[in-house]
């Protein structure tokens, strides 16, 4: 990563346990400003990251640091780091991170495909609070998938109108899916639960497999030698 050889590590926090910092398993000197996690990341990015490379994961003593991972405040987060022995920062290219997102999206589609028949049946025969909550999560998941597709189009020269899936441009599949999602929302607002079930089973479910093929084609294109 262009960070050179191993460096002598000064204490990261005055008067406390020495905290060691690593990038992709290579030890680096601790950041000069550790007043916030943002400052730590900014300094690491400026000093060690190559173009088109970003931080993809942070671990503290081997445990992943999740977004809003239970810390009550920035000062508590720093206190936690101060008491730890090892902060590991892992980087990746934008393409690697995009492919990770695609793999996550495909896993999500697999779960949705398995769960949709029972969700449709629930709307037909015994809808309850859990049924509507599952429907909300489904719509939120596909909102995220649409955002992912927008990012892929904007950053990786993905042209859905030129990508042919099952003899049809991917852009048409995409627009049809958006239309079905809109009908699902409208049917729910109108209280037409039978129509929701029909849309899920006969319109939505077949398009899940198309989405998976679209994402697979995009991933293969991104991994292909340029």
Image: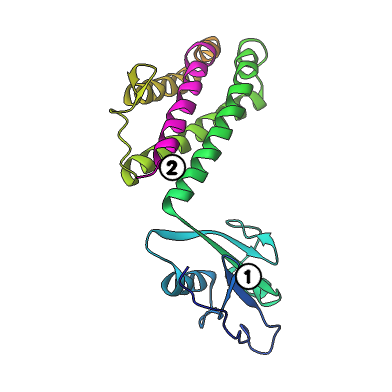
- As rendered, which of 116 and 51 lies closer to the eye? 51
10 Å neighbourhood of mark 1: few (<14), some, or many (≥20)? many
The residue pinned by badge 2 equals 223
**Residue shown at 43% from the left, 49% from the top:** 95
State which region is magenta.
Answer: 200-226
Residue 170, percent from left and from top = 35, 25
Which residue occupies the extreme front position in the image?
225
Residue 220 belongs to magenta span: yes
SS majority, magenta: helix
**Relative to 168, 106 lies left or right:** right
Residue 94, percent from left and from top = 42, 52
Q: Which label lies toward us, 1 or 2?
A: 2
**Relative to 12, 219 lies left or right:** left
Label 1, secondary structure: give it: strand
The quarter holding residue 107 reads: top right
Residue 173, placed above or below residue 105: above
In this rendering, the count of numbered labels is 2
- As rendered, which of 7 and 38 lies closer to the eye? 7
Residue 70 belongs to magenta span: no
**Residue shown at 44% from the left, 23% from the top:** 181
Q: How far, Cα to Cα, is label 1 from label 2?
A: 30 Å
The quarter holding residue 221 reads: top left
The residue pinned by badge 1 equals 87
10 Å neighbourhood of mark 2: few (<14), some, or many (≥20)? few
**Residue shown at 52% from the left, 15% from the top:** 196
């Amino acid at each position: 990563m262009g960070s050179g050889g191993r460096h002598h590590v000064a204490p990261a926090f005055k008067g406390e346990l020495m905290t060691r910092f690593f990038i992709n398993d290579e030890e680096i000197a601790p950041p000069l400003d550790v007043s916030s996690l943002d400052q730590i990341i900014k300094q690491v990015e400026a000093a060690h990251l190559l173009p088109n490379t970003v931080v993809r994961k942070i671990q503290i003593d081997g445990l992943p640091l999740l977004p809003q991972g239970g810390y009550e405040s920035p000062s508590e987060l720093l206190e936690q780091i101060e008491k730890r022995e090892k902060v590991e920062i892992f980087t990746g290219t934008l393409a690697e991170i995009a492919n990770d997102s695609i793999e996550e999206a495909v896993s999500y589609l697999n779960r949705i495909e398995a769960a949709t028949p029972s969700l449709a049946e629930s709307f037909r025969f015994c809808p309850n609070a859990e049924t509507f909550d599952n429907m909300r999560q489904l719509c939120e998941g596909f909102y995220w998938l649409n955002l992912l597709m927008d990012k892929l189009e904007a950053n990786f020269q993905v042209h859905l109108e030129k990508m042919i899936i099952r003899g049809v441009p991917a852009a048409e599949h995409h627009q049809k899916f958006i239309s079905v999602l809109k009908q699902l929302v409208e049917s729910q607002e109108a209280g037409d639960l039978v129509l929701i079930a029909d849309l899920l089973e006969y319109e939505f479910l077949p398009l899940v497999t198309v989405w998976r093929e679209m994402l697979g084609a995009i991933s293969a294109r991104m991994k292909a030698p340029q």
